[in-house]
């Protein structure tokens, strides 16, 4: 069971859009519609941003959206704001009652 | 308010045992799976395992099977993560989180984390 693959870092200017990819296999990302995304600011606990590939919890800005194609899931943040600067982790169900996280992506708002 | 309150920071020596806790409130504790997540210093999140407090059904990540024990006491709405013999490599932040919709589901509520430091 290997970690999902995310880019180590992405960056964008305020107002721009960025996309973070999360690549797995047919045994995890590609096999189930149970991909979630978490935002983590330094020294804080993770926060759920997207669940079930593309659903947004109550209270999360509609600037955050999720999608999936094959074995790759994506998180898109539009209208980038300074407070979006954080680490982002994808997570997928991997069968056999287990979950697997991605390695994390550091988002820098320039 | 739905919340998970974790026990305080621990400093232990290699070989010692440890049990950290996660107390749920504001919801039916026995109706949701509780998972544990490790974050080593400067590293990413790792899913360790999960327990259903209603019947103590427990599942482990293959990476953590045999290394830790997850348990729960539903009478006091508390889940636990324990080690019988700590190693320096167990030094990390440990989070508990509620699985909103079953084992496969997302983690919608998180504790603030418990820092475990293992050093001689």
Image (tube, coloured by chain):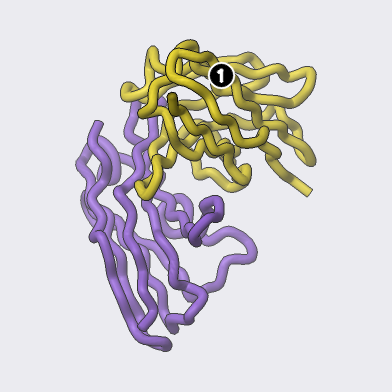
The residue carrying pointer 1 sits among few (fewer than 14), some (14 to 19) or many (20 or more) residues within 10 Å by Cα, namely: some
Instruction: Pinpoint residue A19: horizontal percent, then vertical percent.
Output: 31, 70
Label 1 sits on a secondary structure element that is: strand
Visual hue assigned to chain B: yellow
Q: Residue furthest front?
A: B120
Which residue occupies 36% across, 86% down?
Answer: A13
Pick the front one: A103 or B8 = B8
Instruction: Pinpoint residue B2: horizontal percent, then vertical percent.
Output: 74, 45
A12 relative to B25, above or below? below
Q: Classify residue A16 by image quadrant.
A: bottom left
A54 relative to B23, above or below? below
Pick the front one: B68 or B47 = B68
Residue B54 placement, left or right of A51: right
- The chain containing the residue under callout 1 comes to B
Which residue occupies 72% across, 34% down?
Answer: B24
Q: Classify residue A54 by image quadrant.
A: bottom left
Q: Which chain is purple?
A: A
Which residue occupies 32% across, 22% down?
Answer: B62
Instruction: Pinpoint residue B84: horizontal percent, then vertical percent.
Output: 49, 11
For the C terminus of chain B, the quadrant is: top left
Q: Classify residue B51 by image quadrant.
A: top right
Find disc 1 in the rendering and name its residue: B18
Instruction: Pinpoint residue B66: horizontal percent, then vertical percent.
Output: 39, 12
């Amino acid at each position: 069971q290997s970690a999902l693959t995310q880019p180590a870092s992405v960056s964008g200017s305020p107002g721009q859009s960025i996309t973070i990819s999360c690549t797995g296999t047919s045994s995890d990302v590609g096999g189930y519609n149970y991909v979630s995304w978490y935002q983590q600011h330094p020294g804080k606990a993770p926060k759920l941003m997207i669940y079930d590939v593309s659903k947004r919890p109550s209270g999360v800005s509609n600037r955050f959206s999720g999608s999936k194609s094959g074995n790759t899931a994506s998180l898109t943040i539009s209208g980038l704001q300074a407070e979006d600067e954080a680490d982002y982790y994808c997570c997928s169900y991997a069968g056999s009652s287990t979950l697997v996280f991605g390695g994390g992506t550091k988002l820098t708002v320039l | 308010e739905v919340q998970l309150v974790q026990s305080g920071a621990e400093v232990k020596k290699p070989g010692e045992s440890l049990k950290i806790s996660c107390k749920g409130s504001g919801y039916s504790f026995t109706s949701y799976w509780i998972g544990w997540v490790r974050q080593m210093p400067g590293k990413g999140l790792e899913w360790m395992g999960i327990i259903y407090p209603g019947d103590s059904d427990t599942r482990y990540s293959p990476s953590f099977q045999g290394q830790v024990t997850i348990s729960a006491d539903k009478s006091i709405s508390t889940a636990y993560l324990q080690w019988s013999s700590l190693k320096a490599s167990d030094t990390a932040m440990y989070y508990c989180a509620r699985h909103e919709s079953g084992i496969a589901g997302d983690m919608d509520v998180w504790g603030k984390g418990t820092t475990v430091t293992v050093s001689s």
